[in-house]
Amino acid sequence: MKRVDIKIGFNCNNRCDFCAQGDKRYKSKQKSLTEIKQILRTARASGVSGVVFTGGEPTLHPGLIDAVKAARAMGYVSVQVQTNGRHFAYYDYCAGLKSAGVTEMGPSLHGSSPEIHEGLTNAPGSFSEVVKGILNCKRLGMYVLTNSVITKKNYKDLPALAKLLLYLKVDQYQLAFIHIIGTALENRAGIVPLKSDAMPFIRRALDAGIKKGVPCYTEAIPFCLMKGYERCVAERIIPEGPVADAGIYVKSYGDWRRNQGKLKRKECRSCRWFAICEGPWREYPGLYGWDEFVPVKNKAG
């Protein structure tokens, strides 16, 4: 299924240290409902049948529910709201989204405790709001897939975070390595870990989900660091399709990631995963180099 990613606005009630969109907060305007509907029509005409509303924080957009209704009326069968999850603490709001036609709720949780989560979001009370929001979504019978950004401040907590997510009965969770753009670029010295330092904790977090039969994935971690966990590489399952960002419309997010967003070097050509691996975000080797990325010669175990 192809999916369109619509960034409907860049306002946010968090101030996350790792935000890849943080630089757009004050210089990029919110899309109008008319603009959103036109994007939906354009994508639908090209065969797209899934949409994710994101931002910024999409739940701050006054037209979100109307946008969801419009998407369903146009024939979209999969509608996801990708959010910091704080508005989900209001049960009636969640119920309204479900009634409008949302099929997947995508809240974000970045730590197993208020100290860790709020130390990254800089939003007091946000941890309890997201946890309550996940519980509300599950109470409504919604499919919940969470996203957690891997940073220097939380990577050792990932196993405990996975345990909490499983306790909350999420349907899927993803651990996404920080993308060094936006606010994350400004904070890079104190927030970007070495991938190889984080890997032991990432593996334990994945093990927890695998043991319970819950789908769990990583994003922006090359295959050479994922030996034995290749099935957990999210790039294998990310839907193809366009992205409507701030003032631009990218026809294929997959092509953009592979050709512009991510990076591989000539040594990668000898790796057995070269054809499907996208490499790290291109900013990462500029910070830490390539030494930890070693081409895989043998077959996966």
Image (cartoon, rainbow, N blue to C red):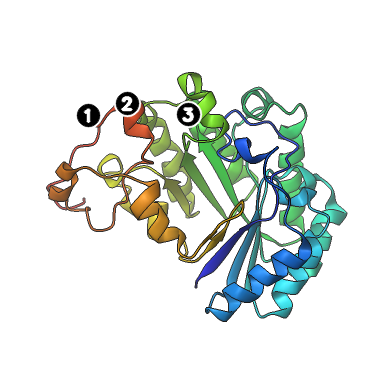
Q: Position of residue 300 (x, y in %)?
A: 21, 51
- Looking at the image, is mark 1 or mark 3 earlier in the sequence? 3
Residue 226 visible? The answer is: yes
Report the residue marked by disc 3.
155
Amino acid type indicated by mark 3: Tyr
Q: Position of residue 226 (x, y in %)?
A: 31, 43
Left or right position of 254 against 278: right
In terms of secondary structure, where does tag 3 sit?
A: helix
Please say if the residues under marks 1 and 2 sit with CB atoms less than 8 Å apart: yes
Residue occupying image coordinates x 79% and y 48%:
60
Left or right position of 271 against 177: left
Amino acid type indicated by mark 1: Asp
Residue occupying image coordinates x 48% and y 24%:
188
Amino acid type indicated by mark 2: Tyr
**In front: mark 1 or mark 3?**
1
**In front: mark 3 or mark 2?**
2
- Looking at the image, is mark 3 or mark 2 earlier in the sequence? 3
Q: Position of residue 289 (x, y in %)?
A: 27, 28
The crowding category of the residue bearing disc 2, from other C-alpha atoms within 10 Å (few below 14, some 14 to 19, many at least 20), is few
Nearest the camera: 211 or 261?
Answer: 261
Q: Whole-Å distance between the Cαs marked 1 and 2? A: 8 Å
In terms of secondary structure, where does tag 1 sit?
A: loop
* Quadrant assignment, res 168: top right
Is 214 rendered above or below residue 43?
A: above
Report the residue marked by disc 2.
288
Q: Whole-Å distance between the Cαs marked 1 and 3? A: 20 Å
Return the mark for residue 24: none
Residue occupying image coordinates x 59% and y 43%:
165
Q: Whole-Å distance between the Cαs marked 3 and 2? A: 17 Å
Residue occupying image coordinates x 53% and y 23%:
187
The crowding category of the residue bearing disc 1, from other C-alpha atoms within 10 Å (few below 14, some 14 to 19, many at least 20), is few
Report the residue marked by disc 1.
291
